[in-house]
Every structure is written in C-alpha cells, then in structure tokens.
Amino acid sequence: MARRRRKRKNESGFEIILGLILFFVLISSSGTKIFRTLLTSFFTGLAYIAVFAAIGFSAIWLLKKVLQKQGSAQKLTLVVLQKMDWRRYEIVCLEYFKAKGYKAEFTKTGADGGIDIILKKSGNADKELVTYVQCKAWSQRVDVKPVRELYGVMAADNIKHGLFMSVSDFTADAEKFAEGKELKLITGSKLLKSIALLPKEQQEKITKAGMQGDYKTPSCASCDVKMVLRTSNKAGNLGSQFWGCKNFPRCKFILKIKASAITKPKPRYF
C-alpha cells in the first residue's frame, strides 16, 4: 500500500509539471496578443528577479570578504606587543590565561606589590593552585631585580608558583636566578607561540581584546585612564613633552618620552 501511494504522488507531481509546460506551449503558439503579453511579462519578471538576486548575493559575498580582510589585518605580532600600552599587554596576558582554563583577575590599580594578575586553578585533592603573575611591557631586557622582587612577594605570601611576563627578553642574571624555582620567565615571543596553539576563536578573542580601539597610548598606572601628551612650561624642562594623567592636578603621574617617539597627538599646556 505504501509503495502505491508514493507512486501516485510522483505521478500527480509529474502531471502538474507536464500540464504547466503544455499550458505555456499553448499560450506561446496562440495568436492572441493578451496571452503573449502575459507570457512576456511573466518571463521578464523572472529575469528581473534573477538579476536582483544575483546583485544581492554578490553584495553579501563582497561584504563578507571585506570583513574577513579587516579581521585578518589585525594580528598579534612582536612588533604590535612592543608598541602596545602596558595595560593592553596585561589584558592580552589575562585573556590568554583565561583561554588556558585559569580563573584570572587583575590586582587593584596602583601599588600592586609587584603582582599584576592572580591565577587560580583547581589542583589535586580539590586544592586551589594560586599563581602570581607580573607583567612588564618594557622595551629593554628585564634584569634580575624585578624578578627577585616577584619571588620575594611569593615567599612572603607563601605562593608556590609565579610567572614573569615580559614583552622583551631577560638578562642572563635574571634567567639564572629563576633556575630551579617555580618561577617561569615568559618572553613576548614565547607568549605569541603559545597563543598560536590555541583554537582560532580564542586567538581572535585575545587579539580583539588587545588591539581594539587605541591600544598604543599609555594608561595612567594610578587611575587606569588614557594619558595625554603634554608640553612642560617649567624652567629647565621648557618645551619638553611627556605623558600626563587626564586627572591632573589630582593625579600627577607622568611618563617621560623620547622626542623621536612623539607622533601626532596634540600637546596640552598647564
């Protein structure tokens, strides 16, 4: 019974298609102007629909290509890390640790005691493993002093594990000090290699977090706001430029810069 029903359905569908074909053949062979006009209008309408559909699909395809190109244009490289604001570098590190399954959070802005990020992860016997992380977006190599200070804070707080993240390399003294300790030194190159091993979606999330908007202008270490390029009018430093906090005079935190590093930001006087 089931086979017969399927056959009847197939036959009825074939009959409908055959009937439509015969209908249009009769219309086209008819000498009546009305039928010919209707037939011409019908096929003309189909042609317009096909053209507009093709234009629409082409526009969507081009838009996707443009968006993909824009997305691929943003890529984390060592040069980008070197130009990145210290705060953005910390955000990149934070997002990387989250992607690795850590519960990561920043310490309070200001005096952080040498700690920028605290990592937590479940360990054996349901014990939570805590790791202290220090981040330095320095152009020069990190010497042994800040590495020793991080280890001192770890010892004072009875923290077994530590990570020192640096855009640049470490000196031989710093590397020698970290040997044999639960203190790993991670350069910018090593960080990028580790990020490249993550799934593509997580890589894109980290890149977006680090590079969206203005990621080059430095942030105030006290207020965590973007700083402003200013020009001093004080004797002895007249005409010299530096990065000053937007919250001046309440906040007097500054960053000295080289004249060659200054680009287009408009100076402000105070």
Image: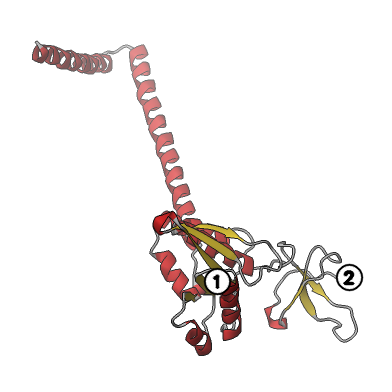
Mark 1 closeness class: few <14, some 14–19, many ≥20 residues within 10 Å: many
Residue 199: % across, % down: 39, 57
Residue 239 vertical position relative to residue 266 in the rendered view, above or below: below
Total marks shown come to 2
Q: Are marks 2 and 1 in contact (CB under 8 Å)?
A: no
Q: Secondary structure at mark 1?
A: helix
Q: Quadrant of residue 43?
A: top left
Mark 2 or 1, nearer chain start: 1
Residue 267 vertical position relative to residue 63 in the rendered view, above or below: below
What's the residue at 37%, 27% (across, down)?
A: 46
Kindly report the distance in space between the C-alpha atoms of the residues bearing marks 2 and 1.
32 Å
Residue 32: % across, % down: 32, 11
As drawn, the residue found furthest toward the right would be 235
Q: Secondary structure at mark 2?
A: loop
Mark 2 belongs to which amino acid? Answer: Phe
Q: Quadrant of residue 141?
A: bottom right
Report whether 67 appears left or right of 87: left
Q: Looking at the rendering, in which quadrant would you find the C terminus?
A: bottom right
Q: Which residue is mark 1?
A: 81
Viewer-closest of 208 and 137: 137
Q: Quadrant of residue 213?
A: bottom right
What's the residue at 9%, 12% (across, down)?
A: 4
What's the residue at 54%, 79% (across, down)?
A: 168
Report whether 144 appears left or right of 9: right
Residue 25 vertical position relative to residue 172 in the rendered view, above or below: above
Q: Which residue is mark 2?
A: 270
Q: Looking at the rendering, in which quadrant would you find the N terminus?
A: top left
Q: Which mark is residue 158?
A: none
Mark 2 closeness class: few <14, some 14–19, many ≥20 residues within 10 Å: few
Q: Taking the image as drawn, is residue 132 in sight?
A: yes
Mark 1 belongs to which amino acid? Answer: Leu
